[in-house]
Image (tube, rainbow, N blue to C red):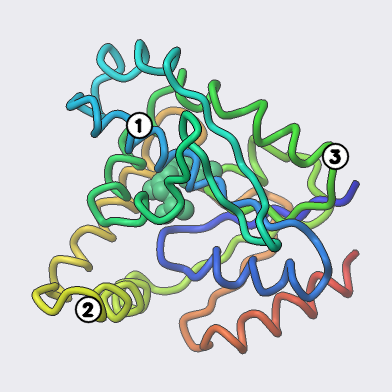
Amino acid sequence: MKSIAIDGPAGAGKSTIAKGVAKNIGFIYVDTGALYRSIGYFVQLNGKDPKDPEQVVPLLDGIKIELKYENGVQKVYLNGEDVSEKIRTPQLSMYASNVSAIPKVREFLFDLQRNLAKTQNVIMDGRDIGTVVLPDADIKIFLTASVEERARRRYKELAEKDESVRYEDVLEEMKQRDYNDMHRDIAPLRQADDALLVDTTENNLEESIEILTKIVKERL
Ligand code: DC
């Protein structure tokens, strides 16, 4: 089986770009952030503090997460409920970032991610795919863009649903999440030594998909 690892900070366009590339080359796209978000959602439902391992870890026994593919689209099920849409809120981004710093949470999700890559050709995105989850991936890409540009993209997306969103707040939250994800003790976000750096600050999504598809086709 072939695997492609895409890591990078929030808002770099990883999921949209990876999805586009997966379609172009006929691979399954795996969004690992959705797994951390689902755990964050469960922690929120139970009214617990996502930063406190003593509150989060006991909840893991009551969590069953499954990834299913419906018409090629990834759906994430938490204890039998499709939570794919619900987990896409700014609050749950932060919950996910917080629970992801807890070693037991990362351990809990490790086999699920690994096993997916054993049975099919995958393009998997996250923070630690090239460094920890799939260290032997055939291709590793570190996808990034300036924090201002990433915040602008996220702001545009959010402002379509909610007019009261402020760019300054989105930028601040993006910086906070970058800091969290890069400075945690376990599996922090970093570029793997053998990953190719791709900066999409100056590219729109179509251009980025085209650039990555070309890189991937050349290297596979
Ligand atoms: O990719 P995303 O924004 O949906 O991810 C949400 C959070 O989950 C992110 O801020 C950090 C965490 N995460 C992680 O620690 N490792 C991964 N492989 C994917 C996500």
Q: Position of residue 33 (x, y in %)?
A: 48, 47
> Mark 1 or mark 2: which comes first in sequence?
1
- Look at discs 1 and 2 and give the one toward the viewer: 2
170 to the left or right of 8: left
Of residues 49 and 135, the one nearer the viewer is 49
Q: Which residue is mark 1?
A: 99
- Measure the C-alpha gap from mark 1 to mark 3: 28 Å
Of residues 187 and 96, the one nearer the viewer is 96
As drawn, the residue found furthest toward the front would be: 80
- Residue 79, placed above or below residue 35: above
**Residue at screen point 41% across, 59% down:** 10
> Mark 2 or mark 3: which comes first in sequence?
3
**Residue at screen point 41% across, 66% down:** 11
Q: Which residue is mark 2?
A: 159
Q: Quadrant of residue 131?
A: top right
Q: Which residue is mark 3?
A: 119
Disc 2 marks a residue whose amino acid type is Ala
As drawn, the residue found furthest toward the left would be: 164
Label 1 CA crowd tier, 10 Å (few <14, some 14–19, many 20+): many
> Mark 1 or mark 3: which comes first in sequence?
1
130 to the left or right of 62: right
Q: How many marks?
A: 3
Q: Position of residue 73 (x, y in %)?
A: 63, 60
Disc 3 marks a residue whose amino acid type is Thr
- Measure the C-alpha gap from mark 2 to mark 3: 39 Å
Label 3 CA crowd tier, 10 Å (few <14, some 14–19, many 20+): few
The answer to whether marks 2 and 3 mark residues whose Cβ atoms lie closer than 8 Å is: no
Question: What element does badge 2 sit on?
Answer: helix
Q: Position of residue 50 (x, y in %)?
A: 26, 29
Question: What element does badge 3 sit on?
Answer: helix
The answer to whether marks 1 and 3 mark residues whose Cβ atoms lie closer than 8 Å is: no
